[in-house]
Image: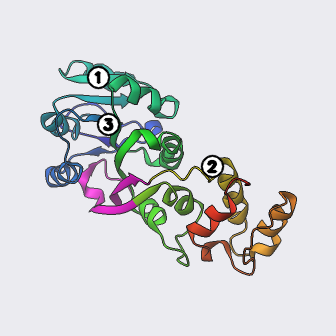
Amino acid sequence: MSSGGSDTHRARKRFGQHFLTDGAVIDGIVRAINPLPGQALVEIGPGLGALTGPLKERCKALTVIELDRDLAARLRRQPGLDVVEADVLNVDFAALAARLGGRLRVVGNLPYNISTPILFHLLASSEQVVDQHFMLQKEVVERMAAAPGSKDYGRLSVMLQWRYRIESVLDVPPEAFDPPPRVDSAVVRMEPLPVDASVDPARLSALVAVAFSQRRKILRGTLGRWMEQQDISTPFDLSRRAEQVPVAEYLALARRPG
């Protein structure tokens, strides 16, 4: 997704561009973010600038990440904007935080076709982030915030909930965009949790991937075998399915030895 506005730029399917045009929705998003002067605010995929203008009015300075060369050129003509023309998946957010001199507040209408890779990419820099507000497909937001035992609870839920407090703050209908997407959207707030240094992120990622690889099966045949191979003897009930296990229990398995 991209922020939008009245302009002649045509949305490009390969970039997943759907421009936000509803003024009431834009106002609601800006109020939810509540940007303040002096904060290191970064917008991903500003597009035609529907959010960019109101955000810049509130925070006075804004860094934007835009892949589309034509849109990046337009954005550079606006005073007060620091334009990073790049694929967001190649942006080092820790280095960006160091350059901007503070922890980041990251916002944006993420391209729905690569929203999950972007969320995982940002995980590595969560210590440099104050909060994140993203427009996403509503179904994805529901998966992110899902509780154990629900049909939406999965790998995405576990891998994000161990690092963030997640809250859906605003539903957005398709008609708020031009062209309208074929799905409902929602704005999610993500606030990083304190880092638990005892958890091995690589180990957590591996075991969660194994656990949800055959989510309809009992864990004894998937995660149980993986635990044997890794020589993990931590007490764990393997008679459940992956979606029945709370995040805290996955974290317990991923703790570093000793």
Question: How far is mark 1 from mark 2, CA to CA?
Answer: 32 Å
Camera-side residue of 13 and 164: 164
Q: Residues within 10 Å of mark 2 (few under 14, many from 20)?
A: some
Question: How far is mark 2 from mark 3, CA to CA?
Answer: 26 Å
- Asked if the magenta segment contains residue 30, the reply would be no
Where does residue 239 sit, x and y in percent of width and height? 74, 81
- Res. 188 visible in picture: yes
Camera-side residue of 189 and 88: 189
What mark, if any, has residue 82 been given in the picture?
Answer: 1
Give the quadrant of the N terminus: top left
Q: Amino acid at mark 2?
A: Pro
Question: In the rendered structure, are the residues bearing label 3 and label 1 in contact, judged by CB atoms less than 8 Å apart?
Answer: no
Q: Which residue is mark 2?
A: 201
Q: Which residue is mark 3?
A: 43
Q: Residue at x 30, y 19 (%)?
A: 73
Question: In the rendered structure, are the residues bearing label 2 and label 3 in contact, judged by CB atoms less than 8 Å apart?
Answer: no
Question: How far is mark 3 from mark 1, CA to CA?
Answer: 10 Å
Where does residue 71 sit, x and y in percent of width and height? 32, 26
